[in-house]
Image: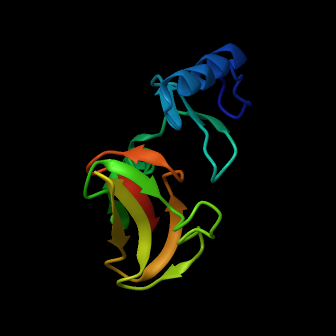
Amino acid sequence: MPREGSKPQIDSALVHQLAQLLDETGLTEIEYGTQEWHLRVAKGSLAPAAFAAVAAPSAPAAAIAAVENDPAKHPGAVLSPMVGVAYIRPEPDAAPFIQVGDEVRVGQTLVLIEAMKVFNPIKCVRAGKVTRVLVANGAPVEYGEPLLIVE
């Protein structure tokens, strides 16, 4: 357990095990932690693998951290309306529909979800700025899973 103000020691064996678990299961992200620390390992075509270890949040920060740890609770979350495969590009070699920092308008296509060989466009229901893209191109998604955040 790191002392306050000190750099946390990262257990490279644990990080390696979690990364290996991602490869074995086909997942793109995994989180693990205790009350004292938290580790998130993610991979995908949108960003390189990310590693983070942080101290447990204080009580007032816990509510903010809950939204950060569960993007589905964010008021600007765009949730998947179905089970399928998410595509952030209209074609494999095409530019993505949206990227972090893009301004989006109501009715704009944000993502396609393929379900039963049908591509379903997920349209923007509120104008704003894309602050997070939470799915990788070609990633499987579940009903209610957050796809991106529009603020």
| Residue at the (61%, 20%) spot, across then down | 20
Examine the rendered structure and indicate whether residue 58 appears above or below residue 38. below
Name the quadrant of the N terminus.
Answer: top right
In percent of width and height, residue 141 lies at 37, 46
Q: Going by the picture, which residue comes out furthest to the front?
A: 117
Figure coloring: rainbow
Please tell me how many numbered marks the rendered image carries: 0
138 relative position to 71: left or right: right
75 relative position to 15: left or right: left
Is 113 or 46 nearer to us in this picture?
113
In percent of width and height, residue 93 lies at 65, 63
Q: Quadrant of residue 79?
A: bottom left
In percent of width and height, residue 40 lies at 56, 34
Is residue 12 visible to the viewer in this orientation of the structure?
A: yes
| Residue at the (51%, 62%) spot, across then down | 88
Is 41 or 99 nearer to us in this picture?
99
Is 50 or 137 nearer to us in this picture?
137
| Residue at the (53%, 82%) spot, across then down | 103
Examine the rendered structure and indicate whether residue 7 appears above or below residue 118. above
Q: Going by the picture, which residue comes out furthest to the top?
A: 13
Examine the rendered structure and indicate whether residue 27 appears above or below residue 117. above
| Residue at the (36%, 76%) spot, across then down | 124
Name the quadrant of the C terminus.
Answer: bottom left
Is residue 74 visible to the viewer in this orientation of the structure?
A: no
